[in-house]
Image (cartoon, rainbow, N blue to C red):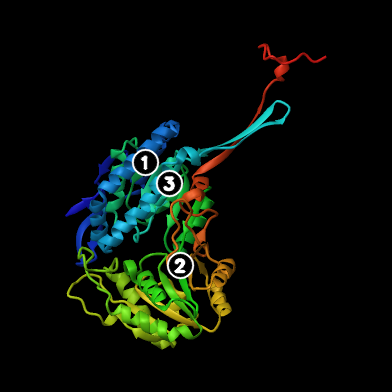
Amino acid sequence: MQTIPHFINAQRVSEAERFGPVFNPATGEQEKQVVLASRARVDEAIAAAKAALPGWRATSLARRSGIFFKVREILNRRKPELAAILTSEHGKVLSDAEGEISRGLENIEFATGLSHMLKGEHSEQVSGGIDVHSVRQPVGVVACITPFNFPAMVPLWMIGSALACGNTVLLKPSEKDPSSAVFIAEVFAEAGLPAGVLNVVHGDKEAVDVLLEHQDVKAVSFVGSTPIAQSIYRRAADHGKRVQALGGAKNHMVVLPDADLDMAADAAVSAAYGSAGERCMAVSVLVAVGNIADDLVAAIRSRMADLKIGPGTDPSSQMGPLITAEHRDRVASYVAGAEGEGASVVVDGREQQFDSDGFFIGVSLIDHVKPGMKVYDDEIFGPVLSVVRAETYSDAVRLVNENEFGNGVAIFTRDGGAARQFEFDVEAGMVGVNVPIPVPVGTFSFGGWKNSLFGDTHMYGPDSIRFYTRGKVVTTRWPDPSTSVIDLGFPQVD
């Protein structure tokens, strides 16, 4: 059985006392095993990152930028290879896998402009003979803890900016689909990144505990569920680290009565069921305002019938399996309990049969959902779309703003005034207008509000530069030029 190793100090390390299973979600079979790090192994990786820090910090911005250009070139060339790895371990269809890599590459492209991003400020003659300037310097060793749902994109979100700013990185990917992290680290090494600057360790709670407590780790970036994000934020902060911890979501898509019905229905299907709903920006609640609800539900239902679910390697598949059997059963339990809470199950994904032992489930549509129902309150993280009916625009906004999450939200309307007012009123970190999944491009930053984010800065883009650097202000006094021993041509003053 193939063993997925750590990558420490530019070397593959396969020795371990414990191993974890890695399944192919499309077949349900364990095809690989991953080494799980002990405390000593994590200490070893942190020591490698610490030792590499002085040299990497002293590396010129031009050379750093050159490495990122090479990484971009290599990843573009090897995209099909990495996409195949993602599909084999996560289950998403190949087109989704390639799209994930492309979105991750946006952040590598952003990092190539590091000489501009790291510029400080300067003010001369703030007082007689005194100048002031500021610089941004790396925080040190950074721990990046990433989720299973985007095993290539989220690491690229973090390590791009962290490395560009002169930090060294210890990446701890999900043990469910860990191969892409090693692949990416080896690409960086091929591009010329020095040994020890980017390390990968696999593990569970034992490894995470070391990262959160170790005195040589100065910052922690995390993406995962809200309970874990909140715990990591508190524990890392208690140990004196700066933290950005992105949590869960319950993203709403508000559809006003004047919206283009076909556009809204197409968007709802792709945003709710793409990547099997296993993404923090998936639309999980559709808020139908006024009299559009019946027609919209019917339009979505008709489109669901044509959705092809199958192995991610099948070019005709539009949705693959879920990541594990346990997660599939958890998603199914929300559909099973919906009617008992008073909702109407329009399409029950549990009824679809598959000729496979993989972790497949059909797509579900649940109407007449209300706050207080588990199917509304909980983050399901699967292909389940809930429909909430609202009488007015104000009712819809109130529903969104009262939800504990504030990651992303979308509105579908033809009315520019309504869209502008929604942007002003809604309490969420990312807003789409006729765009169901408003993930910002790499030159902006990604992050939500409320219980979707713990910390002060968002992920990637400009916010990431502030997170992965510390500001330093230098005040300089120079002698009065008229007293200089060098003749500067100043007139004599009596």
Place residue 324 in its image quadrant: bottom left
For label 2, the SS is loop
- Which residue bears the numbered disc 2? 249
**Residue type at the position of mark 1:** Phe
- The reply to whether callout 1 and callout 3 are in contact (CB within 8 Å) is no
- Residue at the right extreme, as displayed: 494
Looking at this view, is 149 or 207 the one in front? Answer: 149
Q: What residue is shown at x 50% (from left), y 56% (from top)?
A: 233
**Residue type at the position of mark 2:** Ala
Q: CA distance from mark 1 to mark 2?
A: 32 Å
**Residue type at the position of mark 3:** Phe
**Residue 176 visible, this angle:** no
| x and y, in percent, of residue 485 in the image | 68, 11
Ranked by sequence position, the earlier of labels 1 and 3 is 1
Q: CA distance from mark 1 to mark 3?
A: 9 Å
Q: CA distance from mark 3 to mark 2?
A: 26 Å
Looking at this view, is 147 or 296 the one in front? Answer: 296
Q: What residue is shown at x 42% (from left), y 78% (from top)?
A: 261
Asked if residue 176 lies left or right of residue 464, the reply is left
- Which residue bears the numbered disc 3? 110
Ranked by sequence position, the earlier of labels 1 and 2 is 1
Using a 10 Å C-alpha cutoff, classify the residue at mark 1 as few (fewer than 14 neighbours), some (14 to 19) or many (20 or more): many
- Which residue bears the numbered disc 1? 68
